[in-house]
Amino acid sequence: MRLVVSCVQVWLLLHLLLLSLGQIVGSVGEITSLKINANIEHRYAVTQVTTAMKNTNGRSAKLQFQTAMPNAALVSSLIMEIAGTNYTGIIRKKSASRRIYEMAQMKGKTTGVVEQVDDAVQKFVASINVAAHETVTFYMTYEELVKRVDGSYLYSTYIHPGYRIPMVNIDVHIMEREEIIDYKILEMPGQEISSHNPGTKVHGGPMSLGELYLHYHHDDPHDGTGRGVQGVFTVSYDITHYPDGGEVQRVGNYFTHYFSPEGLPKIQTHTVFLLDVSYSMHSGRLDALQTAMASILKGLDVEDTFELLAFSSDVVNVGSFSGEHQQVKKGVRKVKRLVSMGYSNLNAAVLQAIRTANSYNNPQAIKQIVVFTDGQATSGVTDPETIRKNVKEANSHKHPIFSFIFGNNDMKLLERISRDSSGFARYTHHGSTLASQIKAFYKEISKPLLKGVDITYSGTSVDLTTVVRPGISNYYSGQEFVLAGLLIPGALEVHPIVNGMGKDGPYQFPVTRVDARHPFHTSLTNNFTARLWAYLIVKDLLAIADASENVNHTQELHAQAFRIALRFGFVTQLTSLVVVYPDDEYIVVSPQDQLHRERNRHPNNYYESSISGYRRTGRSNIRGNRPQEQVDLDPHFIVYAQGLELPLCFDYHGHNGAIMNLIRDPVSGIIVNGQVTSSAEWPRLTYFTSLFFRLGKVNITITPDRMEVDCLGEDGTRQVKSITKSLWPFYKKNGRRYKHGPDKKLRTLHSKTRQPMSLAGQKRGLGINHIPQSSNVHHTYIRTNNKITNRPDNYFSYNKINNQNNVYGRDFSNRLKRLDDEDSKFCQQNSTWEEGVGRIYGDVMIVLNKKQNLHVTMGDGLAHFAVVRSKNRSGQQFLGFYIKDQQILSAQTHGIIGQFTTKSVRLISPTTLAVNRNNNTENTVKVEVNRRTRKNKHRLSLVSGVLYKRRSLLEETHVECIHIPGKGRGLLDGQPKDYLLNCLHC
């Protein structure tokens, strides 16, 4: 026996991490049988999963075992049976288990993982050493509260070992005080093949007044016709509900209180729908939201009212509506016109939704905010803690905020915002269509019956410090409030007082359904009220600690949660379950390794204020308080480099017609080139007069008065998936913003959110600035009136080197065939700025601001470029180029500006006074530059600079910088001539 046991060396870690299953090496063990036994007593479910896994190999092997459980469940027991001997787990503090785990990793022990699949499921995965032809049996127990959703209690258990199992048994025993009036088996393992999969049987009943038995059995026939099963077993049921103060269950010193009245009249609602229409919503999300919103709005009562707010970079009030048929039709039409575009300014959006709710004056109605978003703030205020603080301060009236979050990312911000306001958040999950999930989410809050529900207990019988309450105060039809607590020593009765405001006025509900008994066993294991209280309070304490902003308070809450989890045997983020083997072998069961999680996630300050942040894998450092990089005038470049607080500035003079490469990224395919033209009056002065962008499949050529967009391929076909010609409700047809809002306050809000940032608040970026300077600085201007000379002949031509968009290389007959294709016409536009803007080509959006600023954005926060047109005193027109934000440029990016995505510069000497050639004193500094050679190697060079100020045309302010003379020699990689091109579109 000892020899067999020693052959089975097992080390398990249950861990809530997004870790690929491919990282666990091993063969898949054969699960010969799986049994699930669930006992649901007054909504509290205790589920035991028994899994037998056999090593069919002729030698000892590492096998992979996996199963799944609901995300809200807490593991309370793990027993392993090996060679007839049982090994039972004990609860330990997480830090002690972590030390054991780290030692095991160093020794190469085997490990297991629990990963979160989506908002509904957590998965147990293990890699185990098992002796030849031996069987390991797992007995895992987990516990959870079965919640009432949309009028039904839903219980699910999962059969997800990664393959089909030949034999499965599921037994569900439900015991309730009130009559079970309905039950349905919504989903069964293998139901998708049930008609072709013999061996499956399902039995329900008999159903007595408050008791129900359900049995599912599958056993593959011995003739080999069976296919095994895997999947989900889901049952829904409901009980009789009364319009009273609910039901109380007391066992010993613990009690639970269930409040779920029905039959009350619905209260009028005023709902502010906040719809995210940023570009990240384009992959079917916005389509699903539009479909769901049409159904949601058509289902509103006539007395209900609603407002629609759409947000991307800005926030727009689409309109206010009643529940009348014509008003709803109007609202649906406007929702269907929305398009995904721009960034996501979540902070401004939620604040505006709160102001909109505050402005509604009907005191009888329930005012609520419903947010549909992917949860990522990419514009405006992006720091989660700042956003949360702003929302808490603004929502003084505690309007409940309900959030539906697209995707299964870790969106703690919206969870916390919703919890702060007595609302809740839901994520998308697998198993049903996105539109149906959205509709189901809203249905939960569509029919409020009570507001301001207040449930109190007498301090003479109940220890009020132990009472766990629901996180919301409005009661909606189909829900249930579950409360739990402890009686003070010697108390035998619980007398709740339940008050709430209904449609017809205040209610006080009597509580007459009270069951009390002494526990059959003194052990807490069999006292469902005690375990339900412990389950609820541990969950509540951890949630409050997660939302707390005070470190000491968080530690105190964690200490309380740990003591209760340890006493009741729950595996939490603070505790682990350890199975001890002979020879000091262990199994460690832990749902969340906090240390490992913190090491693998991005901290809040991950995106540091440095150029190295400009990468595909992270948010741009432009999110910080830095001005964007720019180039305009002579041309004057202002760029930021890693290692310096101040930007670097330098001039790059070019002869008439010179073409320069500004950005070239071989990974993203982004190219930006610029061409300069001399002034007729001052030939040595040059300006940028044309800019060329290659952004994926979209090419854009811009001059001060014209703009050409080309998204056609060599064969003349459209290369982008779609072209959006209307940017309503954010922009007019000419790409300028609407003055939105039904009142002056709203219009004022939008003007504030769009005004240029001060220097201290500018985002760091790259750019080109053409600005007249003092006489001792050379300038390069481009002019487009008749005073400009020698405009290049190929002004709007594509050079043959551009294989994707070669105008001259395309067949002329193909152009004629495209004349009837409306989208193809828009895919090759040569127009004025005003005529050509206000469209989205694939993921590239072009809009106009203040008639002089052209904004080109990619996706939701991938890149934001700005082009400014201006003129000098003589009327000469020129362009300025700015990178306001980006997170797409790779480390391989080059060009006059692009190279600064990775270039590092170090300050060598402090500021000193020196006398220049004009006998003027100036502040000089020396910097060390890490430059890249033509052979892609790096070398250091020392460069002297002067503290200077340059003016930004876009922000209309002066930027302090370190000026490097001589066309940036010693600062730029290579020589200045290396950045000259033969054509604008190369």
Image (cartoon, rainbow, N blue to C red):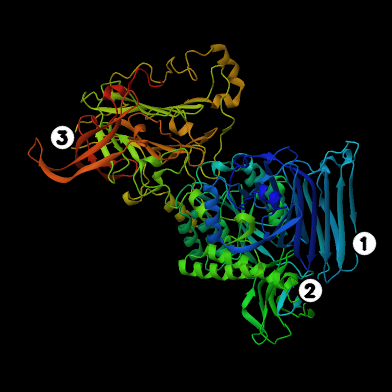
Q: From this viewpoint, is residue 244 visible?
A: yes
Name the front one of labels 2 and 3.
2
Q: Amino acid at mark 1?
A: Pro
Q: Tell me the residue that label 1 is attached to.
A: 206
Residue 243 badge: 2
**Residue visible at 43% across and 32% down in the picture:** 833
The quadrant in which residue 338 appears is top right
Q: Amino acid at mark 3?
A: Asn
In-image side of 753 versus 146 (left or right) = left
Quadrant including the C terminus: top left
Q: Earlier in the sequence, mark 1 or mark 3?
A: 1
**Residue visible at 49% across and 54% down in the picture:** 348
Residue 643: x percent and y percent?
30, 43
Q: Secondary structure at mark 2?
A: loop
Of 883 and 900, the residue lying toward us: 900
In-image side of 724 versus 941 (left or right) = right
Of 385 and 293, the residue lying toward us: 385
Residue 584: x percent and y percent?
60, 56
Residue positioned most to the right: 206
Q: Earlier in the sequence, mark 1 or mark 2?
A: 1
Q: Secondary structure at mark 3?
A: loop
Q: Tell me the residue that label 3 is attached to.
A: 776
Distance from the alpha carbon under mark 1 to that under mark 2: 28 Å
